[in-house]
């Protein structure tokens, strides 16, 4: 039940106190995020870790003035691929083949079948699908943060195109998908800290089909 207790402890922190999170905790959270599953193992996203205060101020300006961005210790920007390509898919599979010591052509059939499905769906579908994969990693990062007793705030309230410009994501073929701020709660000034966590009752949330 330890994980359930940690998830009950966590909440979307509204006010952080500026305290720095130890690097070993950040490394743990990032390692957990890296180990997240993704469709076909492609990991079509990267995480940008922002600690520069000037840059955090600029992100806050395009994130509806949310103070957690500047008061957080670390700001994680999950940025997903803006589209798939045969070259990108091949690069991932080539790494897998090399790491596993497989023959060079071991994944050729699967690679071609995968690209045959993805290519006709268009770049908009690609970008949405890649962002969904980033969200899986993002969710695991939040759980890992709770395990480390690090407060976190999930954020979709920002202007993606502006964050993309600030981080130079367009040139990298990436789009900002979601932001996670990491730090410690300011218990004296956070209106949400002591309020009861409310979720849908299990009887409504889960439907069993036998």
Image (cartoon, rainbow, N blue to C red):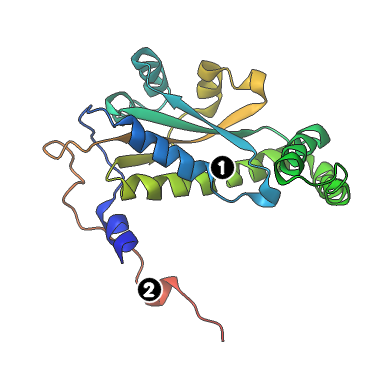
Q: Residue at x 67, y 51 (%)?
A: 39
Query: Can you tell which quarter of the image residue 25 is in?
Result: top left
Q: Residue at x 43, y 32 (%)?
A: 76
Q: Residue 73, how many percent across, how many down?
A: 30, 28
Q: Which mark identifies residue 190?
A: none
Q: How many marks?
A: 2
Residue situated furthest top in the rendering: 54
Q: Which mark identifies residue 202?
A: 2
Mark 2 element type: helix
Q: Is residue 153 left or right of residue 16?
A: right
Q: Residue 205, how many percent across, how many down?
A: 43, 70
Query: Can you tell which quarter of the image residue 210 is in?
Result: bottom right
Q: Is residue 35 left or right of residue 116?
A: left
Q: Is residue 130 left or right of residue 69?
A: right
One can see residue 50 in this view: yes
Q: How many residues crowd around disc 2 within 10 Å: few (fewer than 14), some, or many (20 or more)?
A: few
Name the residue tied to disc 1: 134
Alpha carbon distance from label 1 to label 2: 27 Å
Q: Residue at x 70, y 41 (%)?
A: 99
Q: Residue 135, how many percent across, how many down?
A: 53, 45
Among the two numbered marks 1 and 2 on one chain, the one whose residue lies closer to the N terminus: 1
Q: Quadrant of the N terminus?
A: bottom left
Q: How many residues crowd around disc 1 within 10 Å: few (fewer than 14), some, or many (20 or more)?
A: many
């Amino acid at each position: 039940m330890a994980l359930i207790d940690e998830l009950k402890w966590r909440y979307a922190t509204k006010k952080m106190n500026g305290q720095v999170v130890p690097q070993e905790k950040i490394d743990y959270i990032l390692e957990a995020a890296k180990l997240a599953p993704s469709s076909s193992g492609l990991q079509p996203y990267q995480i940008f870790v922002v600690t520069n205060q000037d840059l955090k101020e600029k992100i806050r300006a395009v994130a509806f003035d949310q103070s957690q961005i500047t008061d957080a210790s670390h700001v994680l920007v999950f940025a997903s691929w803006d589209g798939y390509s045969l070259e990108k898919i091949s690069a991932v599979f080539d790494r897998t083949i090399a790491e596993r010591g497989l023959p060079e052509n071991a994944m050729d059939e699967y690679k071609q079948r995968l690209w045959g499905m993805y290519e006709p769906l268009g770049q908009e579908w690609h970008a949405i699908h890649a962002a969904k994969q980033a969200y899986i990693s993002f969710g695991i990062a939040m759980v890992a943060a709770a395990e480390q007793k690090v407060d976190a705030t999930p954020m979709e309230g920002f202007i993606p195109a502006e964050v993309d410009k600030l981080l130079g994501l367009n040139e990298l073929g990436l789009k900002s998908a979601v932001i996670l701020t990491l730090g410690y709660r300011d218990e004296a000034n956070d209106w949400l800290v002591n309020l009861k966590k409310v979720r849908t009752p299990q009887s409504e949330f889960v439907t069993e089909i036998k």
